[in-house]
Amino acid sequence: MHSSHPSRSPAGAPSQETAPRPATRTDLVSALAELGIETTTVDHSPVFTVAESEALEREIPGGHTKNLFLKDNKGKLFLVVAESHTSVDLKALARRLGAGRFSFGKADLLLEVLGVTPGSVTAFAAMNDRAGRVRVVIDERLMAHDTINCHPLDNSATTIIARDDLFRFLSAWRHEPQVCPLGPQDDTREGARSA
């Protein structure tokens, strides 16, 4: 019988074993604790849009995020973690990443791959992608913040995590994030880089 929690290697990183169900907020808290990552979580009414979350931005310090689940026309999947006020230029981003034309991933694919529903997309959902299908891309604007705020796998709370700890969490789940500009900047700038 498989456990609903991913098994751990001796180094503390999750194994590639497929869990029978997506991770929950409780699973996330356990995974963060196993990695020695301290966070603070604030419960609130569910938020589905950046506009709905603006009041939270005034109350919770740090970099606030909006997350895009994208699929290119070659079938590759991307989780883009943008600073909440970044205007994401999908055409320029596709060029920077060497991807095909982007479209938004459908809700059923989102649930299948990242284990969350629309409105709850978060960097933490990478823990549900045990097959490594998704490439995680982080907005370079978030690098200016010491803490980053993400939903803990549901949109009725916000988890505050140190920027470096978020990168450590993603790496532990075998998703080395790439940092790059997401806005309509000049493509002659440095493109995507690994964190």
Image (cartoon, helix red, strand yellow):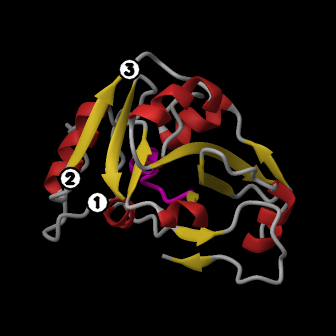
Point 39% across, 37% down: residue = 60
- In the displayed structure, 46 sits above or below 138; it is above
Amino acid at dot 3: His
Badge number at residue 15: 1
Instruction: Specify which label sits upstream in the sequence, 2 or 1.
Output: 2
Please check the rendered image and state whether residue 187 is part of the magenta-colored stretch, yes or no.
no
Mark 2 vs 1: CB contact within 8 A = yes
Q: Is residue 111 left or right of residue 101?
A: left
**Pair 3/2: label in front:** 3
Q: Is residue 87 left or right of residue 194?
A: right
Callout 1 environment at 10 Å: few (<14), some (14 to 19), or many (20+)?
Answer: some
Point 46% across, 26% down: residue = 155
**Do we see residue 106 in this rendering?**
yes
Amino acid at dot 2: Ser
Q: Position of residue 14 (x, y in %)?
A: 27, 58
- In the displayed structure, 138 sits above or below 176; it is above
Q: Which residue is mark 3?
A: 44
Q: Position of residue 164 (x, y in %)?
A: 34, 66
Give how far apart the Cα atoms at labels 2 and 1 are: 6 Å
Callout 3 environment at 10 Å: few (<14), some (14 to 19), or many (20+)?
Answer: few
For the record, the magenta segment spans 125-133
Instruction: Specify which label sits upstream in the sequence, 3 or 2.
Output: 2
Give how far apart the Cα atoms at labels 3 and 1 are: 32 Å
Dividing the picture into quadrants, the one containing residue 84 is top right
Q: Is residue 134 left or right of residue 46?
A: right
Give how far apart the Cα atoms at labels 3 and 2 are: 31 Å
Q: Which residue is mark 2?
A: 7
Instruction: Name the residue furthest front.
Output: 58
Q: Position of residue 13 (x, y in %)?
A: 24, 64
Amino acid at dot 1: Ser
Q: Secondary structure at mark 3?
A: loop
Callout 2 environment at 10 Å: few (<14), some (14 to 19), or many (20+)?
Answer: some
